[in-house]
Amino acid sequence: MHRRIRGETMTPEIDRFFQAEAFGVVGASEDRGKFGNKVLRCYLENRKTVIPVNPKAVSIEGIPCVASVAELPDTVKSISVITPPPVTEQVVEAAIARGITSVWMQPGAESPAAVERCRAAGVNVIADHSCILVVLGFRDH
């Protein structure tokens, strides 16, 4: 049986994703119109601890950034990925090396090779076109 949150079905993979203490947003953007920013704000709107990952920004939405997945704190076990598929493949390798246990590839970030790599490494992966903005009911203010 799937739980429901804000009208959306929570799959076991999504439920497991949200069990993390803190979350990383890989591809976080300073541009409030981009999905990398909206996903970050969605976590904030839902009172989640979140760390933006962006090698070019110092902070986004007032939160200090880290430059790479390797720099995420140990409390981050789940990451949202908002990057082009070839970059997603690199992100997955870094996530596996860092001990990340759940990866949510937002629509457009999915890569069959990255999905397979996650599965082979025992990483919980969401890459079924589910969008965190829909699942958590993001309201863009």
Image: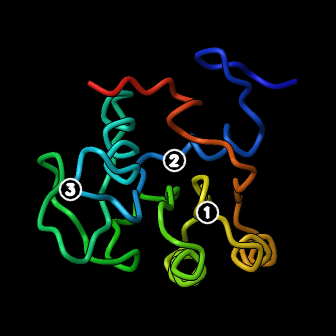
Label ID, residue 101: 1
Residue 129 located left or right of residue 108: right
Which residue does the numbered mark 3 point to in the structure image? 30
Which three-letter amino acid code belongs to the residue tagged 1?
Answer: Thr
Label ID, residue 35: none
- Foreground residue among 121 and 87: 87
- Foreground residue among 11 and 113: 113
Question: Closer to the N terminus: mark 1 or mark 2?
Answer: 2
| Few, some or many residues within 10 Å of mark 1 (<14, 14–19, 20+) | many
Which three-letter amino acid code belongs to the residue tagged 3?
Answer: Glu
Question: Closer to the N terminus: mark 1 or mark 3?
Answer: 3
- Residue 94 percent location from the top left of the image: 51, 82
- Foreground residue among 26 and 2: 26
Which residue does the numbered mark 2 point to in the structure image? 20
Q: Residue at x 54, y 84 (%)?
A: 90
Quadrant position of the C terminus in the picture: top left
Q: Regarding mark 3 in the picture, which secondary structure is present there?
A: loop
Depth-wise, is mark 1 or mark 3 nearer the camera? 3
Which three-letter amino acid code belongs to the residue tagged 2?
Answer: Ala
Vertical comparison of 12 with 141: above or below: below
